[in-house]
Image (spheres, coloured by chain):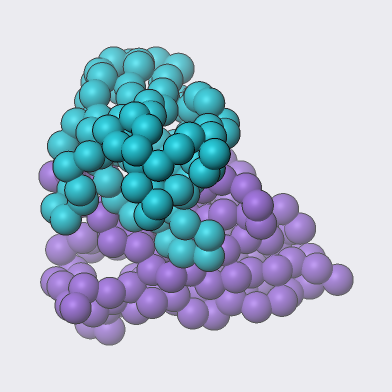
Amino acid sequence: DIQMTQSPSTLSAFVGDRVTITCRASQSISSWLAWYQQKPGKAPKLLIYKASSLETGVPSRFSGSGSGTEFTLTISSLQPDDFATYYCQQYNSYNTFGQGTKLEIK
Amino acid sequence: QVQLVESGGGVVQPGRSLRLSCAASGFTFSSYAMHWVRQAPGKGLEWVAVISYDGNYKKFADFVKGRFILSRDNSKNKVYVQMNSLRGEDTAVYYCARDRMDLAAFDIWGQGTMVTVSS
């Protein structure tokens, strides 16, 4: 099975900061990677698909990059609404999720 | 609007069964594969299973193989998961999600239904 590892597990940042979350796959998944945002008590929301494509309606401050085994999600200028938990997911086999990165206000 | 609504959650004793439903609206349900994803309290997302658009293909995570059964009724726009031999570790919020093969992602999620396995 393909394992997905996110880092860091927790990230503290200020409004306006640029932040990057990393996701590594245990084997190559080409560009079959998605990123989701989840707020407490809510369902996940799709942000990025195929590693770098922005889902409709998602602000352009979110961007994704990478291929193969290493991927990143970048938020260019944090807004108060962005403090949430972020998950990567591989779509190659068994749709495994990363363990999540909690983004907290500093 | 495009929507998924789960139902059927509750408290169940270990070893017993429960059936969850997911009702779809606002899109052509019969054209999409559907997934179940769960989230234990305070934990991350865990993929559970998928059923193809026509119900002919199903795939399960190892931890539910042989215990969970998937089905769908395209005439009712519903997908179901029959959960048998439930264990404490199955306690979680269960979400259904729409598969978008063209995006290689799950683009629509329900609000989730809580399943608690406890004596």
Tell me if residue A88 can be seen: yes
Q: Residue at x 33, y 24 (%)?
A: A72
Count of numbered labels shown in the rendering: 0
Left or right, B112 with respect to A47, comes to right
| Residue B96 locus on image (x, y percent) | 40, 63
Left or right, A96 with respect to B65, comes to left
Left or right, B116 with respect to A56, comes to right
The answer to which of A100 and A32 lies nearer the viewer is A100
Tell me if residue A102 can be seen: no
| Residue A38 locus on image (x, y percent) | 44, 53
The answer to which of A7 and B16 lies nearer the viewer is A7
Q: Residue at x 54, y 80 (%)?
A: B8
| Residue A31 locus on image (x, y percent) | 22, 25
* Residue A57 quadrant: bottom left
| Residue A74 locus on image (x, y percent) | 31, 30
In the rendered image, the vertical position of residue A44 relative to residue A87, given as above or below: below
In the rendered image, the vertical position of residue B69 relative to residue A6, given as above or below: below
Q: Which chain comes out cyan in the rendered image?
A: A
In the rendered image, the vertical position of residue A50 relative to residue B43, given as above or below: above
* Residue B84 quadrant: bottom right
Q: Residue at x 79, y 72 (%)?
A: B13
The residue lying furthest to the right in this view is: B119
Q: Quadrant of the C terminus of chain A?
A: top right
Q: Which chain comes out purple in the rendered image?
A: B
Q: Residue at x 19, y 78 (%)?
A: B1
